[in-house]
Image (spheres, grey):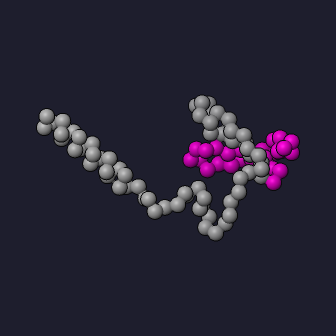
Amino acid sequence: MTKKIGVLAVTALVAVLGVGGCDWSSDNANEHDVTGVKWRQPDKIEVYANIDQHPNVARLCIDGRALMTTSRDLNAVTRVPEWDTWCAAR
């Protein structure tokens, strides 16, 4: 019985520390990458599954120009002129 109470106490402590480590005062970081600059959605977007079968490759259009990007932490954006016709066919 004492061992069970000990396990419950440790579990509760870990949960409290985990929640306590969160920054509850911060705003959504995705909306505030550049302070004072308004953001908007791309004109057109389409998301594809990558080879790992997760949807993290996107082609998107901004002002009629096609770009490829990923939702992974690579921070890569590639211009793909071959997709411009897809952007034009809104």
Q: Is residue 51 visible?
A: yes
Query: Which residue is rendered at x = 27% and y = 42% of the image?
Result: 11
Say whether residue 53 is magenta. no
**Residue 87, how many percent across, how many down?**
82, 44
Q: Quadrant of residue 89?
A: top right
Query: Which residue is rendered at x = 62% and y = 64% of the image?
Result: 34
Q: Is residue 79 visible?
A: no
Q: Is residue 89 left or right of residue 1?
A: right
Query: Which residue is rendered at x = 58% and y = 31% of the image?
Result: 52
Q: Is residue 76 left or right of residue 84?
A: left
In the orientation shown, which residue stands out farthest toward the bottom? Answer: 36
From which residue to which does the magenta span run?
A: 63-90
Above or below for 50 versus 61: above
Query: 88 or 51: nearer the eye?
Result: 88
Q: Quadrant of the N terminus?
A: top left
Q: Quadrant of the C terminus?
A: top right
In the orientation shown, which residue stands out farthest toward the left? Answer: 2
Query: Which residue is rendered at x = 46% and y = 62% of the image?
Result: 25
**Residue 39, how many percent across, how many down?**
68, 60
Q: Quadrant of residue 33?
A: bottom right
Query: 87 or 16: nearer the eye?
Result: 16
Q: Is residue 54 left or right of residue 8?
A: right
Q: Is residue 76 left or right of residue 1?
A: right
**Residue 79, how many percent across, how many down?**
76, 48
**Residue 62, how many percent across, how many down?**
77, 52
